[in-house]
Amino acid sequence: MSVSAVPAPNAATEAWLSVAAAARRLGVAPATLRTWDRRYGIGPTAHTPGRHRRYSPADLARLELMQRALVRGASPADAAAYALSARTVGPAAVVPPVPARVTEDGGASPVELLEEGNDGRVRVGGRVLRLPGASRAARGLGRAALALDASAVHRLLEESIAASGVESAWDDVVRPVLAAVGERWAHSGVGVEIEHLVSECVRPAFGARAAALRPVADARPVLLGAMPDEQHMLPLVVLAAALAERGIPCRALGADLPVTALVAAIRRTAPVAVVLWAQLPQVADVGLLEALPRTRPRFRRYVAGPGWDGVALPERTGRLLSLRAATATISDAVLV
């Protein structure tokens, strides 16, 4: 491997970047940089307690080295140690060998094939996540996600939605990758930054699809919201886009929806249906469902998410088990 140049910081000529600006430069989420700093000590070298983090050019260069090691399959801890071990004395850095990827049996395997394009970005060849039987689009998304290449992830999502629609893009492309990342995290305790990156790209990609479609004029909307204290709402973003493809207007009310806000929205919009998401069982409150106001005309009530598993639901409350089932059920109920 050739020696990579890591420029020494020069505050007089180069601006130091905030967390948000550094994250945009690297194509990762700001939360990922904070996690790397907190867990692995690879952060702004001049950070002072009580002041905002500022990344120097040398800090960014170290983070790029960490990204390259992650692309090659190193764990975040090993990748951070690799980047931190680069010595920045003078105009060039002395870079150690890239750590080899460790196989499940504990042995080191050869570094996966890397291709570097004319734009200087590193791309990974071969399978990088466990995606047995997955589509070519899902495997490509998995490679881009593991490389933390936000631009490629967003482009692949847009292409998948345009080619096959929201439901297929979610079920056949996004869900397999998120499931593989979840398995990776359960097995090794790493990969949260990958899930965050994909989620942050899914929201604008599917949200743009919903915004670009025109619903049926003057139709009563479907209200989509997460239960109080529930922060996870990505599937509702996708559901809104899938319903928009069928001409059904939605009002997305976001995560951690207070009961008073939900009641006010119901009375103000006279919805045709209300869908409440619960990822965790502790937020699946049956009492809230029973406390929803009655309206004329009446609205249909649905719950979705694994938090409702095994919960005895009140009468006239539907359970939505998948995106396709939810889209079909709501369409059949409201498009009459």
Image (cartoon, rainbow, N blue to C red):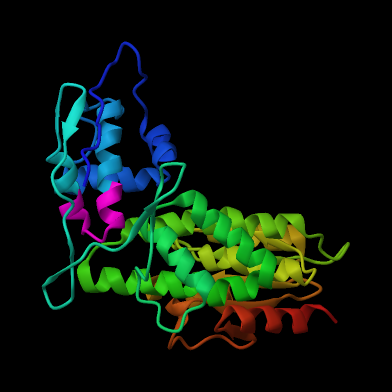
Q: Is residue 224 left or right of residue 6?
A: right
Name the residue at 35% across, 76% down.
Answer: 130
The answer to whether residue 293 is seen in the rendering is no
Between 137 and 23, the one nearer to me in the picture? 137
Q: Which residues are magenta?
A: 67-79
Q: Could you tell me residue 259's position as x and y percent?
A: 55, 61
Observer-nearest of 84 and 236 = 84
Front residue of 204 and 98: 98
Q: Residue furthest top?
A: 12
Above or below, 198 relative to 135? above
* Front-most of residues 17 and 52: 17
Q: Report if residue 282 lies within the magenta region.
A: no
In this view of the protein, can residue 265 be seen by the observer? yes
Q: Position of residue 81 (x, y in %)?
A: 14, 47
Residue at the farthest right position: 217
Residue 333 in the image: state x and y as whole percent: 76, 82
Q: Residue at x 36, y 34 (%)?
A: 19
Q: Is residue 119 left or right of residue 297?
A: left
Quadrant (top left/top right/bottom left/bottom right) for the C terminus: bottom right
> Residue sitting at 22 percent across and 42 percent down?
2
Rendered view: 39 above or below 308: above
Q: Quadrant of residue 249?
A: bottom right
